[in-house]
Image (cartoon, rainbow, N blue to C red):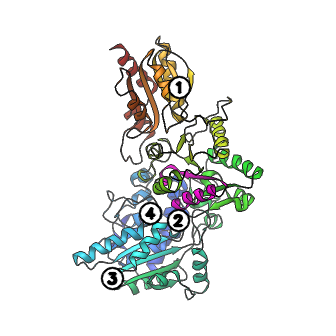
C-alpha cells in the first residue's frame, strides 16, 4: 500500500492478514531506507515490525494503552500513528525523536529512554483505569534484556496482583545490547525450547496467565494471540520469540553491532564513515585489560552496555571471569562493586552518565556510607555527548559531588585520565568516580601526578592576578582559550585545574583573595548544585566576586550543541568580554 496514506492505525485495521503481512515487508523496507541513511536503533526496530503492526491492528489505540519499554523499538509504532513522513521523506527524518514522546502524538503515553520502566508505568495506568471504572486494555511491551532491571521485576510483581485486565508482552530475542546475563535467561531459554511448556515458568510463578508465540515475526500468529487476550479480565503475559534485526542479514548475523549504528551501506552493512580518532571506550578497555592481566583481583563491571567501556566480544572473552555484565541493572552493578571492594577485589564500573542516576541510593547507601573503594568511570558526561532528553550527561556533578565521602575526579585529557585511573584502582581509602573528559579525546603530551591522595588539592597551572579561572575537566580547554583572549587584552589571569569536583581547596582559594578580585568557574554540567556553587559558597561573605559558567537547569531535547553553548554563554570571546566588563565596573 501507499505508506504515506497511513495516518492512523485505523488505516491498517481495514487490511486482510495477507495484506498486513505485505505491509510489514513495506514498512521494514522503508525503515531500512531511513536507518541506512540516518542511523538509529536498527536491530530492535527491525525485530519488532510484525509485533507492532499486530498490536495496533488488534487493540483499539489510542483508547487502549500501549507502553513501550526503553522505546528505542518504536519506529514502526510512529510510522503507523501519523508520523510516516519522518521515515519516508529525508526532509522530515528529524521531525521525530528516537523514543516515545507525548508531545508528538496521543499514541505516545510517556517520554521513555531508560529501560525496565514499562511494566510499572502500565501498572499505574491499569490501576488508574480501575479506580475510575474504565474498560480499556492496558498493554506493557518489555524486552527480555529489560527484564534484568530491578524495576521490571517490581512492576511484574505488582502487576500480577491487579486482578483485572493487564497485558504484558515480553519481546524475547535472546539479546540485550550484547548477550543477556543473569539466571532469568536460562528460564526464558527453557521456555523457548519447550514451546512455552517448560517448568518452572517465571511468569506463572508470579501469578500471571501465560501464552507463548513461538515465531514472534509471524503477524498472523501475533494477531491471533493478541485477539485471544483482548478484553481479558486478569493479568497475562504474552511471551513472543522474535529475531533481532529481522529481515536484514547483516543485522541478524551481528546483533550487537547493529543494535544502534550510524549510517551504513545498505548492500553490505558496512558503515559509511569510519572514524580514525581514538575513543575513550577503547582507551579505557586497553588500560583495564593491562591492569587485569597484572592483577587477578581487578574486576570490570558493566550494566548491559559493554561497548561504552570498549569491551567488545574479543575483550570480554580475554577478560574471562574478571569481566562482569550484570544486565541492565545499575543498582546491582554499584552494590556488587561495593561487595567486591569489601571482599578485597578492585572493581571498576563503567557507566553512561544518565544511566548512573538510577543507582543514586546505592551510591549513597551501599558505597559512600560504607566507604568502600569502588571506582566508577562515568562516560558521556558532557553537553557534547548524547542530546536526547532522556540521556543528558550534565547532571552527574550535582548528583555525585554532593554525596559525602565520594571523591569525584575531573581529568582534563587522556593522560590525566589514565593517571587518575591508576591511582583510583590502587588506593583503598575512598570511593572514587572519574568523569571521563568528554567525547573527543584530547592528548596533551604531559606527565601528570600519579598520587591524588591529597584530596581536594587543586593544580595552579598559571599564576596571575585580578582574575582566576577554575576550569574543570573537559572545560579546561575552554578556560585556556579564555586565558589567551584575556592576555591579549592586557590581563594576567590565573588558570587552575581543580582536578576534584567533590570539594574545595580552601588554602588555594583563600590565597587568591590577596591579589584577585574575580573568580570564574567553568564546568561541563548543570550549574544548580554543581561545582561552581561550591566555590561561590566558599567566598560567600568575602569581597571576592564569583561568576559561574555551566549549563542552566533544564531538560533539553535534541539540542544543537553550538546553540546550547551560545545560550549558556559558553563561548571564549563572550566569557572574556563578560569578565572584562566585571573588572572594569
Nearer the observer: mark 4 or 2; the answer is 4
How far is disc 4 from disc 1 in space, using C-alphas?
A: 43 Å
Q: Residues within 10 Å of mark 1 (few under 14, many from 20)?
A: many
Of 566 and 275, nearer the camera is 566
**Judging from the image, what secondary structure is the residue with disc 4 in?**
loop
User: For the residues carrying marks 4 and 3, which lies nearer the camera in this image?
Assistant: 3
Find disc 4 in the rendering and name its residue.
Answer: 71
Name which of mark 4 and mark 2 comes first in the sequence: 2
* Residue on which disc 3 sits: 164
Q: Return the mark for residue 442.
A: none
Q: Position of residue 281 (x, y in %)?
A: 63, 48
Q: Tag count in the figure? A: 4
Question: Where does the image place residue 379, in percent across and percent down from the top left?
Answer: 55, 47
Of all residues shown, which one is farthest toward the top? 490
Separation (CA) of disc 4 from disc 2? 10 Å
For residue 334: magenta? yes
Under circle 2, the secondary element is: helix
Quarter containing the N terminus: bottom left
- Label 1 or label 2, whichever lies nearer to me, is 1
| Lower sequence index among marks 4 and 3 | 4
Residue 61, can we see it? no
Q: Earlier in the sequence, mark 1 or mark 2?
A: 2
Residue position for label 1: 496
Q: Residues within 10 Å of mark 2 (few under 14, many from 20)?
A: many
**Badge 4 or badge 1: first in the primary sequence:** 4
Task: Residue lying at the far left in this picture: please name it.
Answer: 132
Q: Are marks 4 and 3 in contact (CB under 8 Å)?
A: no
User: Mark 2 or mark 3, which is nearer to you?
Assistant: 3
Query: Which one is earlier in the sequence, the residue at label 2 or at label 3?
Result: 2
The vertical placement of 159 against 234, above or below, is above
Disc 2 designates what residue? Answer: 44
Q: Secondary structure at mark 3?
A: loop
Amino acid at each position: 500500500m501507499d505508506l504515506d496514506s497511513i495516518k492512523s492505525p485505523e488505516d491498517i485495521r481495514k487490511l486482510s492478514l495477507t495484506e498486513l503481512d505485505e505491509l510489514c515487508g513495506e514498512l521494514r523496507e522503508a525503515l531500512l531506507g531511513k536507518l541506512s541513511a540516518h542511523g538509529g536503533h536498527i536491530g530492535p526496530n527491525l525485530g519488532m515490525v510484525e509485533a507492532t503492526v499486530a498490536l495496533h491492528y488488534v487493540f483499539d489505540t489510542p483508547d487502549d494503552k500501549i507502553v513501550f519499554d526503553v522505546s528505542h523499538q518504536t519506529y514502526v509504532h510512529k510510522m503507523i500513528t501519523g508520523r510516516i513522513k519522518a521515515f519516508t521523506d529525508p526532509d522530515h527524518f528529524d521531525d521525530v525523536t528516537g523514543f516515545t514522546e507525548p508531545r508528538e502524538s496521543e499514541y505516545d503515553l510517556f517520554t521513555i529512554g531508560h529501560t525496565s520502566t514499562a511494566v510499572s508505568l502500565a501498572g499505574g495506568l491499569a490501576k488508574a483505569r480501575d479506580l475510575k471504572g474504565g474498560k480499556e486494555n492496558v498493554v506493557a511491551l518489555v524486552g527480555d534484556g529489560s527484564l534484568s532491571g530491578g524495576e521490571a521485576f517490581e512492576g511484574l510483581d505488582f502487576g500480577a496482583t491487579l486482578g483485572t485486565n493487564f497485558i504484558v508482552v515480553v519481546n524475547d530475542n535472546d539479546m540485550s545490547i550484547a548477550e543477556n546475563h543473569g539466571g532469568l535467561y536460562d528460564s526464558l531459554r527453557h521456555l523457548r525450547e519447550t514451546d512455552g511448556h517448560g517448568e518452572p515458568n517465571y511468569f506463572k510463578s508470579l501469578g500471571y496467565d501465560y501464552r507463548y508465540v513461538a515465531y514472534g515475526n509471524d503477524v498472523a500468529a501475533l494477531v491471533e494471540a493478541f485477539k485471544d487476550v483482548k478484553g481479558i479480565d486478569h493479568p497475562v503475559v504474552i511471551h513472543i520469540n522474535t529475531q533481532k534485526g529481522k529481515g536484514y542479514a547483516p543485522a541478524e548475523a551481528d546483533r550487537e553491532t547493529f543494535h544502534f549504528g550510524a549510517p551504513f551501506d545498505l548492500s553490505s552493512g558496512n558503515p559509511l564513515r569510519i572514524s580514525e580518532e581514538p575513543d575513550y571506550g577503547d582507551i579505557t578497555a586497553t588500560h583495564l585489560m593491562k591492569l587485569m592481566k597484572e592483577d587477578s583481583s581487578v574486576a570490570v563491571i558493566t550494566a548491559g552496555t559493554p561497548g561504552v567501556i570498549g569491551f567488545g566480544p574479543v575483550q570480554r572473552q580475554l577478560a574471562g571471569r574478571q569481566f562482569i555484565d550484570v544486565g541492565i541493572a545499575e543498582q546491582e552493578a554499584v552494590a556488587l562493586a561495593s561487595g567486591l571492594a569489601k571482599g578485597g577485589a578492585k572493581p571498576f564500573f563503567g557507566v553512561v552518565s544518565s544511566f548512573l542516576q538510577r543507582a543514586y541510593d546505592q551510591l549513597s547507601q551501599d558505597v559512600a556510607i560504607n566507604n568502600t573503594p569502588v571506582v566508577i568511570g562515568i562516560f558521556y558526561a558532557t553537553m557534547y555527548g548524547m542530546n536526547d532528553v532522556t540521556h543528558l550527561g550534565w547532571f552527574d556533578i550535582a548528583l555525585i559531588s554532593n554525596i559525602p565521602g565520594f571523591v569525584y575526579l575531573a581529568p582534563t585529557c587522556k593522560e590525566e585520565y589514565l593517571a587518575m585511573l591508576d591511582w583510583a584502582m590502587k588506593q583503598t581509602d575512598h570511593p572514587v568516580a572519574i568523569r571521563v573528559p568528554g567525547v573527543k579525546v584530547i592528548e596533551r603530551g604531559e606527565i601528570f601526578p600519579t598520587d591524588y591522595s591529597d584530596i581536594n588539592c587543586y593544580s595552579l597551572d598559571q599564576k596571575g592576578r585580578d582574575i582566576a579561572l577554575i576550569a574543570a575537566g573537559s572545560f579546561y580547554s575552554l578556560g585556556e582559550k579564555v586565558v589567551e583572549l584575556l592576555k591579549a587584552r592586557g590581563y594576567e589571569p590565573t588558570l587552575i585545574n581543580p582536578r576534584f569536583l567533590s570539594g574545595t581547596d580552601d588554602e588555594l582559594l583563600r590565597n587568591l583573595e590577596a591579589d584577585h578580585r574575580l573568580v570564574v568557574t567553568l564546568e561541563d554540567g548543570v550549574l544548580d548544585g554543581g561545582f561552581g556553587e561550591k566555590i561561590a559558597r566558599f567566598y560567600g561573605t568575602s569581597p571576592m566576586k564569583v561568576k559561574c559558567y555551566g549549563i542552566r537547569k533544564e531538560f533539553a531535547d535534541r539540542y544543537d550543541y553550538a546553540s546550547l553553548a551560545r545560550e549558556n554563554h559558553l563561548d571564549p570571546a563572550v566569557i572574556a568580554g563578560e569578565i572584562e566588563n566585571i573588572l572594569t565596573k
